[in-house]
Image: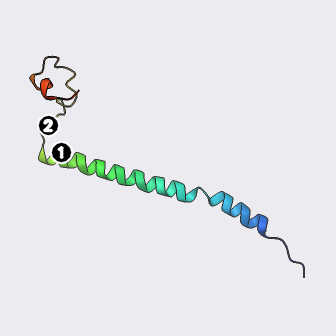
Amino acid sequence: MRTEDLKHIIKLKNKDMEYVPVFGLMFIVVAIISWRWVVGIDYMKENHPDYKGEDWLNWNNEDNDDDKHQIT
């Protein structure tokens, strides 16, 4: 009975599968970030329905009295 060297088969199998943990971890991290983002949007919608986010950057209001209290 002849035995064959199986190292080349095992090596190819490991090379094809070496990115699975990396992509799996990336998928899990993106899923958690997306889920928390949706939860935050839903929270703002339920608890602060009138908030539009217009005070965040103040691009439309050049002479705002609150600017003197801001760092930038």
Q: Position of residue 5 (x, y in %)?
A: 83, 71
User: Do tag 1 and tag 2 residues touch (Cβ < 8 Å)?
Assistant: yes
Q: Residue 1, relative to residue 16: is it above or below? A: below
Q: Position of residue 7 (x, y in %)?
A: 77, 68
Secondary structure category for the residue under label 2: loop
Q: Is residue 3 left or right of residue 23?
A: right
Residue position marked by numbered label 1 in the rendering: 44
Disc 1: CA contacts within 10 A as few (<14), some (14-19) or many (>=20): some
Residue 9 sits in quarter? bottom right
Instruction: Say which amino acid is labelled 2.
Output: Tyr
Q: Which residue lies at the image location 72% right of the left edge and 61% below the top edge? A: 12
Tell me how far mark 1 sits from mark 2, CA to CA: 8 Å
Q: Residue 62, relative to residue 16: is it above or below? A: above
Quarter of the picture holding the N terminus: bottom right
Q: Nearer the viewer, residue 68 or 11?
A: 68
Residue position marked by numbered label 2 in the rendering: 51
Q: Is residue 50 left or right of residue 19?
A: left
Q: Which residue lies at the image location 12% right of the left edge and 43% below the top edge? A: 48
